[in-house]
Image: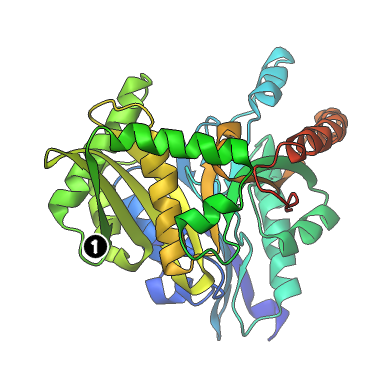
Amino acid sequence: MKQEAIQLRIIDALSDIAEGDWNALLASNSGPFLKYAFLNALEKTGCVGGNTGWQFAHLIVEDSNSGLLGAMPLYLKQHSYGEFVFDWAWAQAYEQNGMSYYPKALSAIPFTPVRGPRLLVSPQADKGAIQEILISGLKTLVTQNGLSSAHVLFPENGELGVLKQQGFMLRDSVQFHWHNQGYQDFEHYLANLTMKRRKNIRRERAAVESQIISYRHISGEIATASDWNFFYRCYENTYIEHRSSPYLTEDCIQILGSSMPENFHLIIATQNERPIASSLLVVDKPNAKAYGRYWGAIEHIPCLHFELAYYQAIEYCIKEGIQVFEGGAQGEHKMARGFIPTTLQSAHWIEDAGFANAVKRFLDREHEGMAAYVDELEQHIPLKSSKVLS
């Protein structure tokens, strides 16, 4: 592979390249959210792009002979919504000093705080060389376009060292994940919890059961347009109740359901044969992982959220042999339902040297505080014997 044959360029829509070429960059453990079908559905339906504040700027590395060698999902952001790594204070500090924090460059899965590769490299290419080209290209993009910074959210652990070598600063986040310890059924799982947590979960499940609620588990392969329509009503209502707007459109949900059905599992709660709530799992069966993404209800039932988003999901994971269930960002309340804290990291590069030094000092202090926070959480892990995972 000759260096002069390699070209780095920006594409302003994923549809500018072939689905097969993009997916060929994905390792077997890349997960569902990096699939062309997922990212392209967000673009096609206007969930990103346009006036959403998410401008497409995907970086790709090509060879005139070999084709696509590498890529980085990338967006120019006009705000910090939908990221789950909060930098509003950095933006405010920029503004107070008469500088613009936005737009900034962001490599992430929109609205999805899930760890995974961000430096995608063809199996036929020199991994280290392509990663260096992508990172250098990202920093050049920031400098040449007068952007404030570049952020790579939740990259896989193997990429963190490469990013750090290139001058990126690392920032800790804590999520709460459920781990399968070879449980035979839900009762077996409960038996592994402390008595206090076990009693609390049984009390919550009994409260829902007293309302005569039943559940339909629907794999993506058999979910109908009507099922997806009802799910979207529930999902949308969650945002309405919080006086917000949903990130995803119904068209996006319908397209995702039809284009990658193997990666979805719906759970719908019914009362008197009338559907009243729904939750959605994104499933990665080859890697034995599940992700709790969205939930919503059109009727309020106490504790139904815990039942539908956690307990029914855990039952599904046990039945299907899923080893890790990620319940989304934040949420210490998840610990009471058997989830344990997990530390993830993101990488950040600030163009202005003065602000970079200030952010580094902030991150150093935050890292110490986060370590103390995780140590405190470890004292309250709901399992009889476990440890914090990283």
**Does 213 appear above or below 25?**
above
* 37 sits left or right of 339 in the view: left
Residue 24 at x, y percent in the picture: 49, 77
Left or right: 59 as drawn, with respect to 168: left
Q: Position of residue 235 (x, y in %)?
A: 30, 37
The kind of secondary structure element at disc 1 is helix
Q: Which residue is mark 1?
A: 258
* Neighbours of disc 1 within 10 Å: few (<14), some (14-19), many (20+): some
Q: Quadrant of the N terminus?
A: bottom right
| Residue 22 visible in rendering | yes
Which residue is rendered at x = 33% and y = 21% of the image? 241
Residue 82 shows in the view:
no
Please identify the residue farthest to the top as the structure is shown: 96
Q: On screen, 307 above or below 86?
A: below
The residue located at (67%, 62%) in the rendering is: 134
Q: Tell me where residue 301 appears, x and y as whole percent.
A: 29, 28
